[in-house]
Image (spheres, rainbow, N blue to C red):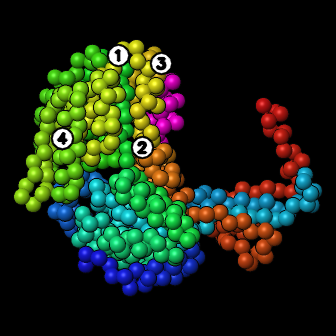
Amino acid sequence: MTDQTPPDRIDQTARAADAAARALAAVPPATRAAALVAAADAVTAHADELVPLAMDETGLTEPRLRAELKRTAVQLRLFADTIVDGAYLDARIDRADPEFALGPRPDVRRVNEPVGPVLNFAAGNFPFAFSVAGGDTASALAAGNPVIVKAHPGHPRLSERTAAIVAAALEEAGLPETALQLIEGREAGVAMLKHPLVKASTFTGSIPGGQFLAGEAASRPVPIPFYGELGSVNPVFATAGAVAERAESFVSGMVASVAGSAGQLCTKPGFVFLPADHGLEEAIAEAAGGVAEHRMLDARIAGGYRERRATILDSAGVRVVAEGSIRIDADGHGWATPTIAAVGLDGLREAFDALRDECFGPLAILVEVPAETDYADLLGEFFEGDLTVTVHRTEGENVERLVRAAAGHAGRVLFDGWPTGVAVTPAMQHGGPWPATTSGGTSVGTAAIARFVRAVAYQNAPADLLPPPVRDDNPWGVPQRIAAPGESSRWGDRSARR
């Protein structure tokens, strides 16, 4: 690929996606599902080609990348089943009712329909699972939308090859030729975001980048939904009982979660709240000191991490538990080992402006608090919105207030574990209040498909003009919620019977 998709190709690509949108919306669910399975099979079959490309461009390890490629294939297959199930269409049929409680009711049928071309800004830290063929692409295609992927500059060759493999598999399975297209370059991405034929966009990246793009999406003559995943420090709260009961596994789990993939994960724990007398410092230093250095994704991220790390370690009241390291080579690439810092609760308050922001790399801050501290109050005092909040406790310890606060603060509340390693499963929620995401929703799990559909109601429509999901013969075999005539006279009866 060139470094920048030329301006004349932006309009061509958008128009091709728009043409594909009309064709793709009419493709039967079984065909669309089979196409996603074909894409999963294709990336799996090319693993030995794609993984070395990803290793070279990102510095991530082979085991991590092979696991991520498998996750990508699993996501595609999961959404194939979601299409066939059809519940995401939320098909509702209210039959005409001359005796309706509020006067005669017309025949009304409501169904979720594809939004149209979706622009996906690929992530840098997940070159498979959040990139060309990742979850955003899979869920948008599953909903019946063509996808334009803006390739991440951190892995351009991998992006180009993955797009070619997946697009060919989709077309061979019966989807329109331009169901998946690729563009490259920041200016091209912004221009495509502004194109009137693009109807929604996704993004995974930094807060400044996401804020800029969200502003561009909102300032269009016709604004569009922008689903950005931006920043998260994922606070962890451990009770005295948890620390005493399982100190060894707590330490090993924390260090592994902070250090994995050089800390370049959106769910990496950034702050770990502990009783002031936790006594884990020596064990943490030993565990962190045993972690080998890991290359960071690119020179820009390595440089940013080095600066952020220095700011944290130079802040008043902060002390080093495990110093770690960041080594920068002549080309600007960096290799890091985990750094664990610690600060008291009063010190955190005093230096919060310097410490509060996400550190994208293998660093975490232990916050040592007095025994009588209520963790629920700290969550509200220090943090806005996050992807996760984690609670470590023992049986019998009352953490209900903290859990209720966590549920209002984050999209996922974990118990006695660590937030890295997001499960690809129907019930997963990977999204939270600002600044974790811009528009809520989830980018992992089957609920992600809801971002790329919009509801349309058809009133007194002729049978032959109804979409298949709300026809009486139900040719797609999807779940239908049917309100029969006469039901309104019985509304409220269920509550009276309870």
In the picture, which quadrant includes the C terminus? Answer: top right
Identify the mark nearer the N-term, 2 or 1: 1
Q: Which callout, 3 or 4, points to the residue nearer the camera?
A: 4
Identify the mark nearer the N-term, 1 or 3: 1
Q: Which callout, 1 or 3, points to the residue nearer the camera?
A: 1
In three-dimensional space, the C-alpha distance between marks 2 and 1, rounded to whole angstroms, equals 26 Å
Identify the mark nearer the N-term, 3 or 2: 2
Amino acid of disc 4: Ala
SS at mark 4? helix
Horizontal side of 126 relative to 99 (left or right) equals: left
Q: Is residue 488 above or below residue 128?
A: above
In three-dimensional space, the C-alpha distance between marks 3 and 2, rounded to whole angstroms, equals 23 Å
SS at mark 3? loop
Check if residue 350 falls in the magenta segment: no
**Residue 79 in view:** no
Horizontal side of 384 relative to 355 (left or right) equals: right
In three-dimensional space, the C-alpha distance between marks 2 and 4, rounded to whole angstroms, equals 25 Å
Identify the mark nearer the N-term, 1 or 4: 4
* Residue position for label 3: 398
* Residue position for label 4: 310
Q: Could you tell me residue 461's position as x and y percent?
A: 78, 73
SS at mark 2? strand
* Residue position for label 1: 370
Q: Which callout, 2 or 4, points to the residue nearer the camera?
A: 4
Identify the mark nearer the N-term, 2 or 4: 4
Q: Residues within 10 Å of mark 3 (few under 14, many from 20)?
A: few
In three-dimensional space, the C-alpha distance between marks 1 and 4, rounded to whole angstroms, equals 27 Å
In the figure, residue 243 lies in which quadrant? top left
